[in-house]
Image: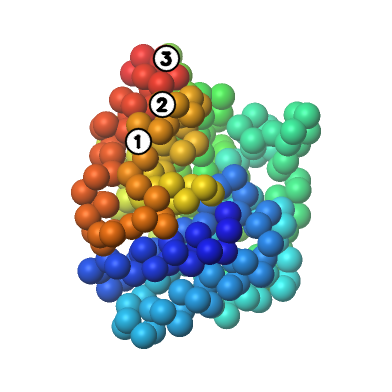
Amino acid sequence: MSENFLRKAVDFLLTSSKPHLQFHFFGGEPLMVPFQRIKNTILYGERKMKKMKKNIQFIITTNGILLDEKKLKFFKEHKVLLELSLDGKPEAQDKNRPQRGGQSSYYLIVKNLPLLWKSGVKNSCSMVVSPLTVDNLKENFLHIIELGFKKIFMMTACGLDWRGKLEKLKENLEEILKIYPELLKKKKIILLNLKEWLNPFRMNTELAIDTDGKIYSACVTYLIPDSKLRKKFVLGHICKVKTSIDEFEKKRLDNEKAMKVIYESQNILH
């Protein structure tokens, strides 16, 4: 994504009437973008938000493989929140997110966790539960805690066929419910879903700018495989915005509509 589009995305966000805003880098893997481009975008956003007396929380969802001391130092200084994608034990991680060719991604990620803890950067874990990993959901959740995470956002994988697995999801969530009060009390573990979850599944329908500058409800950009169908859900282009982001908010897909669109696009009944 070009720096020009990134700056325009910041400008677009700041048309909101809200004083507290979020600017979220996600992908793909956002840290594959030249890091100076990310730094420049954050610095640009900080200058603009101060002038406008607003606040932007910058968030980066990353697998953590490309983290290093230099990046973490910048994130700490600028109060960036890192959402680290990790789905549990090695078997779960490698089922959901193998490297190209099928090799393990788990150890590439966890080797950088000591650096993250040492840096003091605000962080949480984005743990995705899929039909492939739901049978061991509880032990994967506990493994994330053992690795050192204090804040966990547990998401169900959307756009996949959950038939025959929903009962197992329910059973595991009920098991976690039994142990969670003690985890909260003794280890200060915070399950972020308790305040952010939307039934029946949480689709990511926040406004998103794709790499070509087109504006979508975010889930459409990566869960609809057909490019022709995806065009039907373009809300605009970042270079041609004439109204505030608040007006675009009214156009984005709601949770139920997004579910219908995504599952029908992949010929999966829901």
Residue 255 in view of the camera = yes
Residue 128 higher or lower than 239, as above or below: above
Residue farthest toward the bottom in the current orientation of the protein? 51
Mark 3 packing: few (<14 Cα in 10 Å), some, or many (20+)?
A: few
Residue at 36 percent of width and 76 percent of height: 55
Residue at 50 percent of width and 59 percent of height: 5
Q: CA distance from mark 2 to mark 3?
A: 13 Å
Q: Nearer the viewer, mark 2 or mark 3?
A: 2
Q: Which residue is mark 3?
A: 267
- Within the image, what quadrant is residue 17 found in? bottom left
Q: Which residue is mark 2?
A: 229
Residue at 41 percent of width and 26 percent of height: 229
Q: Which residue is at the front of the view, 137 or 202?
A: 202
Q: Position of residue 174 (x, y in %)?
A: 37, 34
Q: Which residue is mark 1?
A: 233
- The numbered mark, 2 or 3, whose residue comes first in the sequence reads 2
Q: Amino acid at mark 3?
A: Asn
Residue 91, numbered label: none
Q: Position of residue 24 (x, y in %)?
A: 46, 58
Q: Amino acid at mark 2?
A: Leu
- Within the image, what quadrant is residue 258 found in? top left
Q: Position of residue 138 (x, y in %)?
A: 50, 36
Mark 2 secondary-structure assignment = helix
